[in-house]
């Protein structure tokens, strides 16, 4: 066992033993000195600790010291009632602190009780209750602030964990302190009751057992009772004071001495005014010498402070000038300017209230939800999204950047709502015409007063933060393959490595490198296929990587293994899905134009032929769109990837799947064929 554990055990066992076994007066003197010493240690630690959590064990300490002090009270009571001798410490406190006068001692004792009960205990109890309540109420806001800082890149994951842990520690500490103050109050109450018992019981014992007169018994036992009360109440008072000091701490920047001196004696004109008032009071019947002396001292202190402040300002100005000069002379460190944020959202000053939680904005919370949504939908961890204001933009404009390059923008009216007609609204409402930024749909800006009527008529009404969040989500999905880095892939591998050690050890790096796996995952994400089922993806790669390391071909094998997920996402499982097929002649022509190189494959189809094929594609998918269906073209497995590359520059949202990627439970119906 550790020495600290033994010491605490002995401390508590001694308290329990004293409740049962009488102890000699000499040992009682020793233990009373220990009690006073512990109380002083606790008070000074509470005074000079930088913050409340520095003494997180304080509630437990209160409980330990309370039971020890009560045990001393019980032991001293036994000695007082048995033989009228409770040791030198108790007797000295009763006679010396009371000034040798019984009445003075009683008055001093009563004053100490009043101070402890009505001032310190009551104040500490109230502060503890309020602090605990406000700490618990503030927890959600603090958690949201941490999430916001984490998402904007202001803090790291480790710092976020530390802050969350500190919030939990504060909640537990102040909740425990709320209960611990009840121990302190109960201890003071018990001390008062024990004192009354000692006084009454001592007088009775003196008169009956020792045949004292009532006056003699009163004087003898009253001094011992007051001494016992003082020797227990003074440590109790120090513990109560320590409790009050600890729960009222508001700063951790410096110790309490520095804070008090700086905050009370840092303004020279205050010292001048106080000094002048004291000197004026000296001309009243009050003692002139005392008040005038204090007044002169305060004026002198104010003068010295004024000189120090002037000197500090001059030194600061010189230091600032030297720093600026050194900054100019020093070669500029441009390394910090070379870093590129993968995703940025810049906005004008008119959008700042939407991102400021103190003004009721929830844009930061929505950014958190975007990262969670994409993680669930695509199985990819979106990097930190940097949010920053840009005064060069229009007040209500925002710009989305990928790798520091603007890829999309939009403009909102922060005090309006966007209303969109889903297609079946008959009665129109008045508004400012605009375009929805995510899908470029026609929309209207309407006021708050029009919102309810628009919803009744069937319009889809969206608030400005939702518009920005939706736009940001769609842009991230569109560029998610570019955002996925090798380090991200390595992190994904590490996440499943413990549960799939055999698979990972076989695949990486024996069969494929991290970069090759990255290209396969990028190919999947580029077409909206989730990579959340990494085990199936890696199993497929481990099966086919020994025969080919062409990432395009490996991607097709993976897609075929993920056919249930692909069918579930792009094809309706509970009804017939309308599709368009590809003419086998076109497939043959495309495959004939494919050229293989060491760097990969490419298509050498003539531009005129490509244009004819794309015109046919446009004609066929227009049929699907007129039916309200998604533009889906089904091809043979061997040509799917090349046809998708060919059509990607012409049709961004075109879905191309192969016959092998259609689950057997899905029914499809061809409504056309791409042909020339």
Image: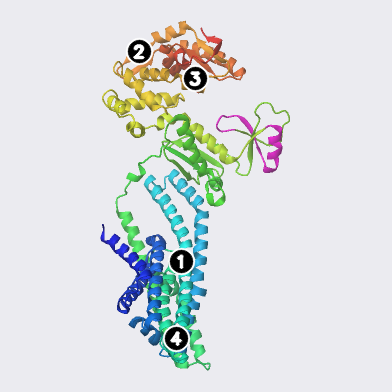
Label 2 SS: strand
Mark 4 and mark 1 lie on one chain; the one further toward the N terminus is 1
Query: Label 1, on which residue?
Result: 183
Earlier-in-chain disc, 3 versus 4: 4
Whether residue 585 appears in this view of the structure is yes
- Element type at marker 4? helix
Residue 504 x, y percent position in the rendering? 30, 28
Q: Nearer the viewer, mark 2 or mark 4?
A: 4
Judge depth for marks 4 and 1 and give the one in front. 4
Q: Which residue is mark 4?
A: 208
Q: Which mark is residue 595?
A: 2
Crowd rating for badge 3 (residues with CA inside 10 Å; few <14, some 14–19, many 20+): some
Indicate which label's residue lies in the foreground, 3 or 4: 4
Q: Is residue 650 visible?
A: no
Residue bounds of the magenta highlight: 436-458
Res. 567 mark: 3
Name the residue nearer the viewer: 648 or 420. 420
Which residue shows up at 49% across the image and 71% down it?
121
The picture places residue 658, in percent across and down from the top left corner, at 46, 14
Disc 2/disc 1 C-alpha distance (Å): 84 Å
User: From mark 4 to mark 1, how far is it between C-alphas?
Assistant: 36 Å
Nearer to us: label 2 or label 1:
1
Specify the quadrant that holds the N terminus: bottom left
Q: Is residue 533 magenta?
A: no
Mark 3 or 1, which is nearer the eye? 1
Q: Residue at x 49, y 11 (%)?
A: 613
Numbered mark located on residue 604 in the image: none
């Amino acid at each position: 066992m550790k020495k600290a554990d033994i010491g605490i055990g002995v401390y508590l066992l001694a308290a329990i033993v004293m409740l049962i076994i009488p102890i000699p007066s000499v040992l009682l003197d020793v233990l009373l000195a220990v009690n006073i010493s512990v109380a002083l240690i606790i008070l000074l630690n509470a005074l000079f600790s930088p913050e409340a959590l520095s003494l997180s064990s304080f509630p437990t300490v209160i409980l330990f010291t309370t039971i020890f002090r009560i045990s001393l009270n019980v032991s001293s009571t036994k000695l007082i009632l048995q033989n009228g001798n409770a040791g030198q410490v108790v007797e000295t406190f009763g006679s010396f602190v009371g000034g040798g006068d019984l009445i003075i001692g009683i008055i001093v004792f009563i004053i100490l009780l009043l101070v402890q009960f009505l001032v310190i205990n009551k104040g500490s109890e109230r502060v503890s209750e309020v602090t605990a309540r406000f700490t618990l109420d503030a927890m959600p806001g603090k958690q949201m602030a941490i999430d916001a800082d984490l998402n904007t890149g202001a803090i790291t994951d480790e710092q976020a964990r530390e802050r969350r842990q500190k919030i939990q520690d504060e909640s537990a500490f102040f909740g425990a302190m709320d209960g611990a103050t009840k121990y302190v109050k109960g201890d003071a109450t018990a001390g008062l009751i024990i004192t009354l018992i000692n006084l009454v019981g001592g007088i009775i014992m003196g008169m009956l057992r020792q045949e004292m007169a009532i006056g003699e018994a009163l004087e003898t036992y009253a001094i011992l009772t007051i001494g016992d009360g003082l020797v227990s109440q003074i440590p109790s008072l120090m513990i109560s004071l320590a409790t009050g000091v600890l729960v009222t701490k508001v700063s951790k920047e410096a110790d309490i001495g520095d804070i008090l001196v700086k905050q009370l004696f840092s303004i020279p004109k205050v010292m001048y005014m106080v000094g002048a008032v004291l000197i004026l009071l000296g001309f009243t019947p009050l003692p002139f010498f005392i008040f005038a002396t204090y007044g002169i001292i305060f004026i002198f202190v104010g003068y010295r402070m004024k000189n120090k402040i002037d000197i500090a300002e001059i030194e600061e100005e010189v230091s600032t000038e030297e720093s600026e000069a050194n900054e100019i002379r020093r070669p500029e460190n441009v390394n910090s300017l070379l870093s590129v944020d993968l995703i940025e959202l810049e906005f004008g000053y008119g959008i700042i209230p939407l991102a400021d939680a103190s003004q009721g904005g929830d844009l930061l919370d929505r950014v958190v939800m975007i990262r969670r949504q994409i993680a669930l939908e695509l199985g990819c961890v979106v990097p930190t999204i940097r949010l920053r204001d840009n005064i060069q933009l229009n007040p209500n404009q925002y710009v989305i950047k990928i790798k520091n390059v603007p890829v999309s923008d939009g403009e909102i009216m922060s005090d309006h709502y966007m209303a969109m007609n889903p297609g079946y609204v008959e009665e129109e409402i008045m508004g400012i015409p605009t375009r929805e930024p995510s899908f470029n749909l026609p929309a209207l800006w309407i006021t708050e007063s029009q919102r309810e009527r628009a919803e009744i008529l069937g319009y889809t009404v969206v608030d400005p933060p939702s518009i920005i969040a939706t736009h940001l989500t769609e842009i991230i999905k569109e560029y998610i393959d570019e955002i996925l880095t090798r380090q991200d892939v390595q992190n994904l591998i590490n996440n499943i490595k413990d549960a799939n050690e055999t698979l990972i050890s076989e695949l990486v790096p024996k069969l494929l490198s991290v970069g090759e796996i990255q290209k396969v995952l990028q190919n999947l994400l580029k077409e909206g296929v989730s990579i959340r089922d990494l085990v199936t993806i890696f199993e497929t790669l481990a099966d086919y990587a020994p025969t080919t390391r062409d990432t395009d071909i490996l991607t097709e094998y993976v897609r075929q293994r993920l056919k249930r997920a692909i069918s579930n996402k792009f094809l309706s499982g509970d009804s017939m899905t309308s599709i368009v097929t590809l003419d086998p002649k076109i497939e043959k022509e495309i495959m004939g134009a494919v050229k293989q190189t060491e760097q990969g494959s490419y298509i050498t189809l003539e531009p005129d032929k490509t244009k004819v094929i794309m015109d046919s594609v446009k004609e066929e998918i227009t049929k699907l769109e007129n039916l309200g269906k998604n533009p889906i073209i089904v091809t043979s497995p061997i040509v799917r990837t090349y046809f998708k590359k060919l059509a990607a520059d012409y049709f961004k949202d075109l879905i191309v799947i192969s016959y092998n990627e259609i689950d057997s439970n899905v029914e499809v119906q061809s409504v056309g064929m791409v042909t020339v």
